[in-house]
Image: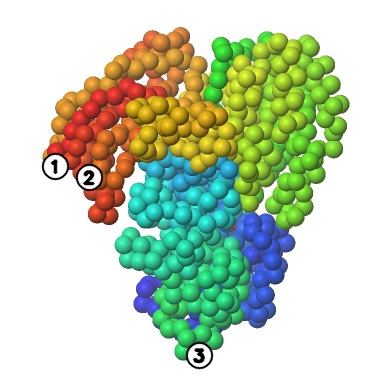
Amino acid sequence: MEQTKLVELFNSLTLDEKIGQLVQLSGNFFESNDVIPTGPVSKVGIDENKVYQSGSILNTSGAKQLKDIQDRYLEKSDKKIPMLFMADIINGFKTVFPISLGLGCSFDPEMVKKTAQIAAKEAAVSGIHVTFSPMVDLVRDARWGRVMESNGEDVYLNCLYAKAMVEGYQGDNDPSSSIASCVKHFAAYGAPVAGREYNTVELSERTLRDQYLPSYKAAVDAGCKLVMTSFNTINGIPVTGNKEILRDLLRDEWEFNGVVISDHSAIKELIPHGVVEDSKAAAKLAIEAGCDIDMMTSTYSNNLKELVESGQLDKKFIDEACMRVLELKNDLGLFENPYRGADEEAEKKYIMCDEFRQFARETVSKTCVLLKNNSILPLNKNQKLLVVGPYANNNNLSGSWSINVDPEKVITVYDGLKKQGNHVSHTNGSPLLDEDSKLDTFGYGKTVKNDNEDAQTLLEEAMNQAQDADVIIVTLGEHPHQSGEGGARGDITLPKVQIELLKSLRTLNKPIVSLIFSGRPLALKEVDENSDAILQCWFPGTEGGDGIADIIFGKVNPSARLSMSFPYSVGQCPISYNEFSTGRPAKTSTHSKRFTSRYTDMPNDPYYCFGYGLSYSNFTYSNIQLSDNTLTLNNKITARVTVTNDSEIEGTETVQLYIRDLVGSVVRPVKELKGIQKVLLKPHESKEVSFDISEDMLRFIRRDMKFDSEDGQFVAFIGHDSSTENQQQFVLIK
Ligand code: GLC
């Protein structure tokens, strides 16, 4: 629709109709039966005759279903403004990829972009217009449940993924293969105090800007059409009512002119936050702060009109929010085609088609991280294998955001291994959860019924079956709902009953390969002490079993690297590689050991560090060389290494460039990732890998709060992971 026509339509709207565009409900208000509740399903309390004025619904899908809803809606809509259909498509729609934390370990933004493209295709033909994705929250605390939904702890990497995902979803805005991207959760939701869900965030403005905001900015710069507000506070003010964040920063400084939508119930939650007394004040605070759409409450619907008519609220706030929603609908072509990409025939052709499933399988083998391998892997197909443990033949492999997955289509570990191995048997070995587990699922209050199999019986059966095995593959992990929203944990170890299984099998003195299924980094010390090989599989999605088997039997040489540190213990959380030195660094302080920054009962270093991951190849690095030791505003320094594959197996190495600013006007991280390159090396092949270093890579929020670099000494590192000491110094002279 021409802008002039859109303005005419806007001008024809009543105040009620404008407010209606700012309300998002769920599909069940429109006779949709299979609604997927992704938030507290409390009573919304909306006036029945306002339901058909609302502007959008969430988490209902299916071409026919959404066409029917749109038809019913438009029949009853005076001004015939089509409804927007939004959904949580986080790591795939029907073809489910590894969880985002796993995708983050690929160190392959192009691969991650393609997962978004496939998700967009499946969602578009299913009638979806908008996805609440990518989630780009920086996370450094494994206790928080939603680390599974993030790409990890690194600023640079998260920015690459944010851009890739937005471009993957939105493409060229083709209705049949693209959906609008809503970046979330703005901002800094991934830094809750104590890792506890929905908790307060306490960050200095410098840390917020240097570490936590860049990935949202990357999504905005990539053109995301929506931003979702986060539940948390920043500087003591809930973001959903925080004008400094939503207007001054997002709209004025970043020049974002798309739609801002609240997170689920977040506007109404301004009341329990204690920044407003009632829903009328909540509506006023949120709309004036710049939050356009009220997700799943009646706060806007029941209060905005009275606020305007009583002179407590300037109508302009409603006008601008409504216009942004209409412009989004117009940008998506809904006035011309309210169904957009919904197409039943295309659904049949594209949903979980072989091409998409094959690619999903490749993403599995590129995201599973090989943490240990005492020359056990890869296995050969004639070895007698026992697959044992609660994930041996379990199709619940897609993580807590796979709300559209078809479990019957998921390839289990046993499914995958038996296709490639000649002698593979399986048994459960143990329940998934300890007897005293109090885990609530997304069923809101229903506790996960522990597996009703007796642990002792399962263990005895496993020990019997293991007698005959050459190699024991132990599948261990969390329940998918021990991570995800509401999935914070104060203890990040595996259930005792699973460790008991592992230790019992260890007494048989047979090679043990442990496969770990989790939505977070776990404390794996006991697994390491009782395994010859460890593969971190995350929740690998629909093609999990096949992708894992490809690695186990050596069809694929693992190349993934950790995008989040694995703590030695929960006591180290939050932990990340790019920490500050402190005045008493444990490794270099002149003070006696006691009086340095350390623990008395565990090391400072994580169990597995950021960037770590093994391959079946063995990669060696030459010393780093710099083309120059002086960097100015007008030149670049090229940093070079030669990487050699010192093995008989072709493999891909992920070469990482880190930089340290030795002295700043404020403290600076001991390392910061500034470049990644993947290099494929044949057996005994060497290749030179180089990175250009330029002044703009050295900028940060200085003491004067300006984003800029400072003269001085720097160190460039190039290596296999964040623990590398392969370094050369250079100086910046501006
Ligand atoms: C949830 C989540 C958010 C999701 C939204 C809609 O509470 O916080 O990530 O997109 O509600 O389901």
**Disc 3, SS:** loop
Image quarter hosting the C terminus:
top left
Residue at horizontal 75 percent and vertical 37 percent from the top:
433
**Disc 2, SS:** loop
Going from the N terminus, do you reach mark 1 or mark 2 first?
2
Left or right, 268 with reference to 469: left
Colour scheme of the picture: rainbow
Q: Residues within 10 Å of mark 2 (few under 14, many from 20)?
A: some
Amino acid type at image mark 3: Ser
Q: Which residue is disc 2 drawn over?
A: 709
Kindly check if marks 1 and 2 are in contact, taking CB atoms under 8 A apart as contact: yes
Instruction: Please provide percent x and percent y for residue 356.
Output: 55, 38
Instruction: Please provide percent x and percent y for residue 461.
Output: 84, 21
Left or right, 536 with reference to 408: left
Q: Is residue 420 above or below residue 517?
A: above
Going from the N terminus, do you reach mark 3 or mark 1 first?
3
